[in-house]
C-alpha cells in the first residue's frame, strides 16, 4: 500500500499549493490525510467536481502554479465541461493534477451505479486527452517515482495529468474524526419520517446511506419499499427527479429526502423548483454537515442554513428542525398537508439537523436497480 502522507508530500514537492475536490470512499485515507496534513497545502472541499476545476483554474491564473483535484470517478462528468471548454490545451491550457478514486473497476464487485462509470473511466481521460497512470496496492516505489516524473513533465508543459486509484491503494497515518454536535440520530429520523409520510405518497431519496437506511426502515415497518425511488447515483439530482415526478403526477404527494452534500452539489435546483411552485412537493434535507457516505469529511459549507436558502429563493414555507420537539411538530405539519394536499402551496422544505454515524451492519438493496424501478412504477400504475 501507499502512504497517503507520502503522496501529499510529493504533491507539495511538485510546487502544488492547493488541493481541492469532493470526498470519495476509495480515497478515504487520502482525504483523512488532507485533514491531518501538517505541510503547507491549502485544502478546499468544493460543492462539486466542476467547481474544483474552477478553483484550480483560478489558482493557476493567480499564482502560475497548478492545483490538485481529487474526486470519485463518478465526478468526472461534473468536471468535463470546465476541463474541455476552459482548461484544455486548445483553449487556455491550464495544468492540473487529478487524483481519481476508481469505483466499479472492471473485474471487481461494486454497486450497480458504479459499473458503467468504472468501465469507461480510463476511456474518458483518453477522450479528454489527459495522460494518466493507474495505481494500486501492488504499485512499487520505482513505479511511483516514474509516475511522479511523468506527472511533473506534463504539468510543466501546461498539460493535465491524472492518477487513477484502485481500491485499497492508500494507507493512512492518522484517522480523521470530528463531531457536528447535533443530537438527532439520522436513521431514527428517517424511520419517523416514514411513519409521518402517507403510504400512498411517493418518495425520492438521495445517494448514499440515506437511501440505504430508508430501504431497510421501509421494509422493516411496512414489508416493502414500493413507493421509494432510490437515487443510488447521480449525486445532487434527487430533487429534480422529485420535481419531474411531482409535475407528472400532480395529484400524488411527492417527498424528496435529500442530503446536505447532495443539495449543495446542484443548489440551483432549489431556485428552479421554487419558481415552478409544485404544490405537491415536500423537500426534506437531512443535514449532518458532512459527506458521511464516503468517509464523513465535512462538506466545507457546514454553516449553510438550507431553510434560509429555501425562503430566499421562494419556497412557500421552510423550517429548520434541530430536536425531538421539532420533529414531533413536523408530524403535525405533514398530517395537515396530507388532509388538504390539493390546496397547499408548494414547494415546502424542512431541514433536519442530525448527528454523524450509522449502523455497522447497514445493508444495501437486495434487488437490482431495474427491479426497484419496475416496482416503483407499478406503484404509480405506469
Image (cartoon, rainbow, N blue to C red):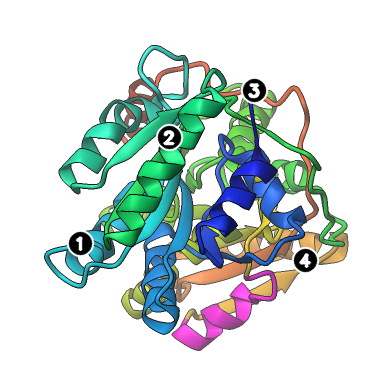
Q: Residues within 10 Å of mark 4 (few under 14, many from 20)?
A: few
Residue that badge 4 annotates: 329
Instruction: Check whether the beta carbons of the residues at disc 4 and disc 3 lie within 8 A of each other.
Output: no
What range of the chain is rendered magenta? Answer: 301-314
Residue that badge 2 annotates: 146
Q: Residues within 10 Å of mark 2 (few under 14, many from 20)?
A: few
Which label's residue is closer to the chain start, 4 or 2?
Answer: 2
Q: Residue at x 51, y 87 (%)?
A: 312
Residue that badge 3 annotates: 363
Q: Residues within 10 Å of mark 1 (few under 14, many from 20)?
A: some
Tell me residue 114's x, y (percent): 40, 30
State the CA–CA distance, disc 4 to disc 3.
30 Å
Which label's residue is closer to the chain start, 1 or 2?
Answer: 1
Please give left or right for residue 339 compared with residue 327 in the image.
left
State the CA–CA distance, disc 4 to disc 1.
52 Å
Q: In this orientation, which residue lies closer to the viewer: 124 or 353?
A: 124
Instruction: Check whether the beta carbons of the residues at disc 4 and disc 2 lie within 8 A of each other.
Output: no
Residue depth check, mark 4 versus mark 1: number of the one nearer the observer: 1
State the CA–CA distance, disc 3 to disc 1.
42 Å
Residue 250 shows up from this direction: no
Amino acid at each position: 500500500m501507499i502512504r497517503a502522507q507520502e503522496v501529499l508530500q510529493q504533491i507539495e514537492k511538485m510546487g502544488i499549493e492547493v488541493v481541492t475536490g469532493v470526498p470519495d470512499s476509495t480515497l478515504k485515507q487520502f482525504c483523512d490525510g488532507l485533514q491531518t496534513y501538517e505541510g503547507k497545502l491549502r485544502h478546499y472541499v468544493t460543492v462539486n467536481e466542476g467547481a474544483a476545476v474552477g478553483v484550480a483554474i483560478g489558482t493557476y491564473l493567480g499564482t502560475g502554479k497548478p492545483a490538485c483535484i481529487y474526486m470519485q470517478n463518478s465526478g468526472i462528468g461534473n468536471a468535463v465541461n470546465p476541463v474541455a471548454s476552459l482548461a484544455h490545451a486548445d483553449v487556455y491550457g491550464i495544468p492540473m493534477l487529478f487524483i481519481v478514486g476508481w469505483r466499479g473497476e472492471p473485474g471487481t464487485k461494486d454497486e450497480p451505479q458504479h459499473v458503467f462509470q468504472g468501465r469507461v473511466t480510463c476511456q474518458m481521460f483518453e477522450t479528454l486527452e489527459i495522460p494518466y497512470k493507474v495505481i494500486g496496492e501492488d504499485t512499487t516505489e520505482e513505479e511511483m517515482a516514474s509516475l511522479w516524473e511523468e506527472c511533473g513533465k506534463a504539468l510543466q508543459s501546461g498539460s493535465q495529468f491524472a492518477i487513477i486509484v484502485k481500491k485499497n491503494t492508500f494507507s493512512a497515518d492518522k484517522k480523521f474524526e470530528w463531531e457536528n454536535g447535533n443530537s438527532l440520530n439520522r436513521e431514527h429520523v428517517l424511520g419517523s419520517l416514514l411513519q409521518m409520510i402517507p403510504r400512498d405518497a411517493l418518495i425520492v431519496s438521495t445517494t448514499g446511506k440515506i437511501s440505504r437506511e430508508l430501504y431497510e426502515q421501509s421494509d422493516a415497518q411496512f414489508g416493502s419499499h414500493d413507493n421509494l425511488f432510490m437515487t443510488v447515483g447521480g449525486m445532487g439530482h434527487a430533487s429534480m427527479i422529485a420535481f419531474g415526478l411531482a409535475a407528472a403526477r400532480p395529484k400524488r404527494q411527492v417527498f424528496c429526502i435529500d442530503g446536505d452534500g447532495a443539495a449543495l452539489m446542484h443548489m440551483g435546483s432549489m431556485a428552479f423548483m421554487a419558481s415552478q411552485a409544485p404544490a405537491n412537493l415536500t423537500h426534506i434535507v437531512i443535514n449532518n454537515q458532512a459527506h458521511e457516505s464516503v468517509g464523513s469529511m465535512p462538506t466545507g459549507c457546514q454553516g449553510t442554513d438550507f431553510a434560509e436558502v429555501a425562503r430566499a429563493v421562494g419556497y412557500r414555507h421552510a423550517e429548520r428542525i434541530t430536536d425531538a420537539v421539532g420533529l414531533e411538530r413536523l408530524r403535525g405539519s405533514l398530517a395537515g398537508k396530507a388532509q388538504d394536499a390539493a390546496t397547499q402551496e408548494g414547494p415546502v422544505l424542512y431541514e433536519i439537523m442530525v448527528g454523524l454515524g450509522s449502523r455497522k451492519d447497514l445493508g444495501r438493496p437486495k434487488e437490482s436497480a431495474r427491479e426497484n424501478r419496475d416496482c416503483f412504477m407499478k406503484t404509480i400504475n405506469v
